[in-house]
Amino acid sequence: MIQFKTVTRDNFKAIIHLKVAPEQEEFVATNLFSLAQSYVALLNDPVPPMSFGIYEEDTLVGFIMMVYTAAEDNEFADEAIYSIDRFMMGEAFQNKGLGRKAFAEALNYLKTLPHGPATAIYTSYEPDNHVAKNLYAQFGFIEFAEDAGESVARLEL
């Protein structure tokens, strides 16, 4: 069973040491960088990011960072959204169906509108990251923009 667990002193080191395969490193920021971004956002943004370790039972298998953006702060459209800003599965846990289960769990979580109403979920990925592109497309995400060299995709809520 996939669970999201809050980043704590107890799992912080394990999360920052969790890595993707070497050939995937160009596609996703390190978990340490993502947690640093979460910390800065926590101190400066009106709504804190939602950063979690992804667990299969009691085993850490991945990391996810999700964000709520109000309509007036959305650079692409006048709509409040949730975004999946980081999603990674540790190298040892890939190709086992866990990424698909974790992504489905993330969508279910965001559909509860934990920080307020929204009309869509956004995510982005490097155009050469065909694994991510295919995964997101299987869940109904449709590419609609580019930002800083990344493809941006949207799923209607």
Image (cartoon, helix red, strand yellow):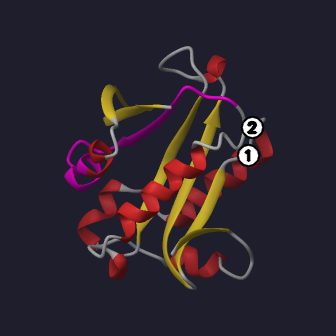
- The residue labelled by disc 2 is 45
Q: Residue at x 73, y 46 (%)?
A: 48
Query: In the displayed structure, does residue 122 sit left or right of residue 79?
Result: left
Query: In the displayed structure, does residue 44 sit left or right of residue 33?
Result: right
* Magenta-drawn segment: 117-134
Query: In the displayed structure, does residue 138 sit left or right of residue 3?
Result: left
Q: Which mark is residue 48?
A: 1
Find residue 45 and report its horizontal and vertical position in percent: 74, 37
Find residue 2 and report its horizontal and vertical position in percent: 51, 71
Find residue 126 and report its horizontal and vertical position in percent: 29, 45
Q: CA distance from mark 2 to mark 1?
A: 6 Å
Q: Which mark is residue 40?
A: none
- Total marks placed: 2
Answer above or below: position of 19 versus 68.
below
Q: Check if mark 2's residue and mark 1's residue have beta carbons within 8 Å.
A: yes
Kind of residue at disc 2: Asp
Q: In which image quadrant can residue 146 be found?
A: top left
Find residue 119 and report its horizontal and vertical position in percent: 55, 25
Query: In the displayed structure, does residue 3 sit left or right of residue 133?
Result: right
Q: Closer to the camera, 70 or 4? A: 4
Q: Residue at x 50, y 32 (%)?
A: 157
> Neighbour class for label 1 at 10 Å: few (<14), some, many (≥20)?
some
Q: Residue furthest top?
A: 78
> Neighbour class for label 2 at 10 Å: few (<14), some, many (≥20)?
few
Kind of residue at disc 1: Pro
